[in-house]
Image (spheres, rainbow, N blue to C red):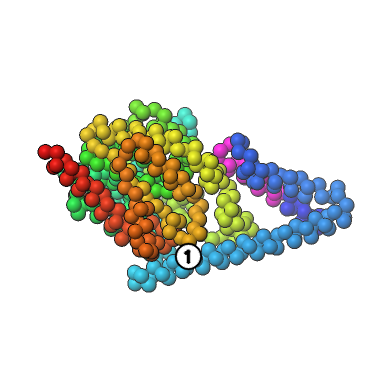
Amino acid sequence: MEMLFRASGATCFLVAGVSLYKLDFGLSNAVPLAIFVGAPSIVALVFLNIARFSYGFRLALFFGLFTISVPVYAFEMWLHYQYGSSEEKIYSRMEKQTGQPYDRRTRAEVIRDMWQQGKSAYPNNPDLFLSPPTEDFTGIWPLANRSGVSVVVCNETGRYYIPTTDRYGLTNPDSIHDLPSRDIALVGDSFAQGGCVEDNTATQLRKTFPGTTSLGLVGAGPGLQYALLKEYLDVIGPKYVFWLYFENDLSDLVDELKQPVFRKYIEDPNYSQNLVGRQQEVDQVLDTFMEGFERKASATSLTWRPWRPTDIFLLRRTRQQFAMNLTGPRLQGNDIDTISTALPTFESLLVRTKEIVRNRGGELVFIYLPSSVHFISGGRSERLDYKLRDDVIKIVDRQQIPMIDMKAAFDKNDAPLGEYFWYAGSHYNIKGYKLVSRHILDFIGSRQSADEGKQ
């Protein structure tokens, strides 16, 4: 028994050491420090000095830990079963809906397979897979993707959405940059990029306005969205800029405020990397990353990590259930007070964007995109941004920015979850994207009618 305690003590010290190394926000947050460093260290000290305690204490400790561990690990195994079961239900439902087998490969596997077929495929959004820059970083930091390649975005229907990037690394047909006018620009995250279907909002709008340009990127928060607009707005020159706000953007902004390059854009209105003229450098950075891709893929967010036997031992699902993952942003992401701290920065970025667009002869329009949580009885989400809906709308109203409220549009349907989403927690389905594009076209039509009435 003594050897078992000592081995467990050494393991606890190892857990504490790895946690201290991986915690990405230093020593300032007491909660993750206590959970991942403090508790294992205390347990390790007790276990390593177990010989100092009486036999009765050791026996009581052993049975106490056993009594606690059994229900905890039973709960973990139940969560694994539930998670796998719900995934399979989604796969089966989408297979019935599409009549095609569901592609269960990870994004990293898709990229690898495409390279083996001689196709140039890259991961999507450099911010999600490049190592974060340091405070003294002076090189070039890609905001968009590599130019002229396929990027593996996401899969919710059984088929991966894999668009080709334009000359600036954005997911648009490259030919639109040769058109005389590009009236519409979409700014946002995956909903602006078109996740996870080809027949998305930008595609729909191009039927009427062929030059519609998307600046959207999966995982982009307001900081990255603003930076992309700063860098690429001049080469687009749109009459309308539609800011597609989704209900995780404030959480993303909290994380972006920790990233040195994004902070430069946010804190300095004049900052720019002049990326339009440096695409070759951007491509080189991303080409360098792709060297040794197999080794790097497992250490990045290129893939949803497959299940491993150690996941049960490390209580992976339990930690996810209670938002107690190792990295700081996830722990803080469920804190509504923390998310609220991003509101002033968000308002500042909106004000600045409105001014930039207006100075170039355009108009900024805000589109509020709701998540599925609003349409589920008793629904809850890992991201609590949806609880700040009223605060976001007040900011938009205060800055007198025209707004299209898609939640109000979805509410007009008796069953919006089934009508506009693939399933709870998904992006919009084709009907959802079509409704968004219809409201954009209606807004432009009303503006054009108003302009004609003034003449």
Percent of width and height locating residue 77: 61, 64
Instruction: Please state if 21 lies on the left or on the right of 235 as rendered.
Output: right
Residue 397 occupies quadrant: top left
State which region is magenta: 10-26
Residue 288 occupies quadrant: top left
The answer to whether residue 50 is magenta is no
Q: Residues within 10 Å of mark 1 (few under 14, many from 20)?
A: few
Position of the C terminus, as image quadrant, is top left
Kindly report the secondary structure that dominates the magenta region of the rendered protein: helix
Percent of width and height locating residue 60: 82, 57
Position of the N terminus, as image quadrant, is bottom right
> Going by the picture, which residue comes out furthest to the front?
453
Nearest the eye: 260 or 446: 446
Q: Residue at x 54, y 44 (%)?
A: 335
Nearest the eye: 171 or 330: 330
> Going by the picture, which residue comes out furthest to the left?
455
Q: Residue at x 30, y 32 (%)?
A: 355
Name which residue type carries label 1.
Glu
Q: Residue at x 20, y 43 (%)?
A: 447
Percent of width and height locating residue 365: 29, 42
Q: Where is 312 relative to 398, above or below? A: below
Nearest the eye: 26 or 123: 26
Nearest the eye: 257 or 168: 257
Q: Where is 25 relative to 203, above or below? A: above
Instruction: Please state if 312 lies on the left or on the right of 93 as rendered.
Output: right
User: Could you say whether the residue bearing mark 1 is in a helix, strand or loop?
Assistant: helix
Query: Residue at label 1?
Result: 87
The answer to whether residue 15 is magenta is yes
